[in-house]
Every structure is written in C-alpha cells, then in structure tokens.
Image: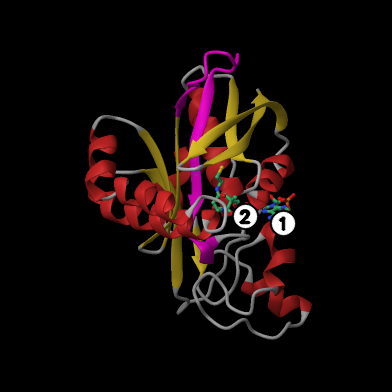
Amino acid sequence: MTHNRNCPPRGNTLRRLEFPARDACGHARQPRKSGTQAALDRCIPATGWEHLNRPLTRGLNEGAALCLYPLMSTVLIEIRRAKAADAAAVAETHDEAWRNAYQGIIPGTDLEKLISRRGPAWWDSAIRKGSRVLLLVFGDRVAGYANYGRNRARSLFYDGEIYELYLRPEFQGLGFGRRLFTAAWRDLGQSGLKSLVVWALSDNDPAVEFYRALGGRAVARSSERFGTRVLDKVAFAWRA
Ligand SMILES: CC(C)(COP(=O)(O)OP(=O)(O)OC[C@H]1O[C@@H](n2cnc3c(N)ncnc32)[C@H](O)[C@@H]1OP(=O)(O)O)[C@@H](O)C(=O)NCCC(=O)NCCS
C-alpha cells in the first residue's frame, strides 16, 4: 500500500486525524479543504509495491483509489515479516513504545531492566530462530511490530496468541494497530490456529480499549509481578 505524503491515511481513521496537529509524517496538518480537494488528497497512487505487498496485506486495502498525479511524492506503508537486518529498528521501536506505554504503571527500574534486555541482539536472535515478528513500516521507518505464535497458557483453550503489539507513539491512533492485529491474526489462521488470545495489563487503558474495540472478549484475569509491584492483567479472546 502506498500513501500520499501530503495527507493522512484513509478510511475509518480519518475521523481521529483532526487531532493531533501533526500527521504521521511529522508534517503540520492542513486546514480542512473542500470535499473534492479532500477526496483527491486521499487518493492512493498505485505502484508496483502495491502488487508486491498484496499477498500479505490482502483485504487491508479496500477502498484504495488510484490517482494520476504526475509529480506526487509517496510513502510506502507495508506490513511484512521482520528480517535479521531489522533487529536494531525493532529494538528501538520496542524501547520507545514500552517507555511510553508503561511509565507510571511498571516501576521505573523494572521497566528499564525489561527494556534493556530487549536490545538488538535479543531481536536478532529471535528473528533468526524463526519467531514470527510482523512489522508495519512507514516509508523507511519501523512504525510498529507484532510478535505472535502458539498460545502459551495451557489453562486457556485458545490456539494462537499475540504476545506483543506495539507502535511508536507518533504512529498510534491512525488505524495501524488494527492493521497489524488483522495481519497477525490472518497469519495465525493460515497456520491453522483458529482462535486467539492477547494479554494486556489492566492498567494499560488504551490497550484494553483497543482490544475491546477490535471485538475481543475478556476471558481470564491473572497477575504478574514487576519488582515490588503485582499488576493485574486481562486476557482478550477471538474465535474465527
Ligand atoms: C494499543 C495500540 C496497539 C493500538 O493501536 P492504534 O493504531 O493506536 O489503534 P487503532 O488506531 O488501530 O484503533 C483501532 C480501534 O481501537 C480503538 N482505540 C484505539 N485506542 C483507543 C483508546 N485509547 N481508547 C478507545 N478506543 C481506542 C479505536 O477507536 C479504533 O476503533 P475503530 O476502528 O472502531 O474506530 C497502540 O496504541 C499502541 O501501540 N499502544 C502502546 C503499546 C500498547 O499498549 N500495546 C498493547 C500492549 S498489550
């Protein structure tokens, strides 16, 4: 999928794009335009990449329009498997997203330990060993990742699990989380895993709201110790 650098993504995310004042490209948002101009700005010029990405992103691109702007600059947004060469960028994304999501929830020193354990070497090894890690790449920047596989909790009768789904703060609230979730869920389904569970800390309100918005049903509660603090967590589940 390609994206016009001068305008926000399309579809049901546009509603939320009136705020903040900068878009995912880091550009100041333009004042509202006439209906026709706004529609033209939302056009997605087709490129060869669109076709290359189709197997993985099939179904995620509904509504893409074609534009004939001769000099339009574009940003490629793709969802693809991580390669070992992505390890440093994934580690950086993990660091930014975790710091942002868990400050004030996980005690500071424990959060630092969790983040420092997951440096480039950890990701390099995980990717080389075949862990499933999907990236959402915006231009040349890793905007977010999801890693997933078989459900780890034997007491829960679900086949697959999304272990982590994180976006850098500036890419949140744009519909990218839903896209990554959908791509990971589809990939699990293609491996015969027809039900899915995801855990979120109960205090992580945005994540809890996100999984609810995606139709997840709260099916279990548990807790996890982080240093001196014990935090509640909730499992959301889906069935194909
Ligand atoms: C949680 C996270 C993955 C969501 O991704 P996102 O791109 O921000 O979410 P999307 O824009 O795709 O939103 C998808 C839906 O969830 C809803 N949603 C997302 N965040 C929400 C929030 N904080 N409150 C209420 N609804 C929310 C949206 O309204 C949207 O619903 P709609 O499609 O019906 O309009 C992302 O914000 C993130 O990385 N957060 C920090 C890390 C984290 O907490 N990860 C989860 C760990 S378990």
Given the image, on which type of amino acid does mark 1 rest?
A: Asn
Q: Which mark is residue 175?
A: 2
Camera-nearest residue between 141 and 20? 20
Given the image, on which type of amino acid does mark 2 rest?
A: Gly
Residues at circles 2 and 1 in contact by the CB criterion of under 8 Å: yes
Left or right of 47 in this view: 128:
left
> Hey, which quadrant is residue 35 in on the image?
bottom right
Residue at x 43%, y 51% (from the top left corner): 111
Q: Is residue 169 magenta?
A: yes
Residue at x 57%, y 13% (from the top left corner): 155
Camera-nearest residue between 171 and 98? 98
Q: Residue furthest front?
A: 228
Find the magenta span and give its range.
149-171
Image location (x, y in percent) of residue 108: 45, 56
Report if residue 113 is visible in the image. yes
- Under circle 1, the secondary element is helix
Q: Residue furthest bottom?
A: 31
Image location (x, y in percent) of residue 230: 56, 38
Camera-nearest residue between 135 and 106? 106
Q: Which mark is residue 165?
A: none
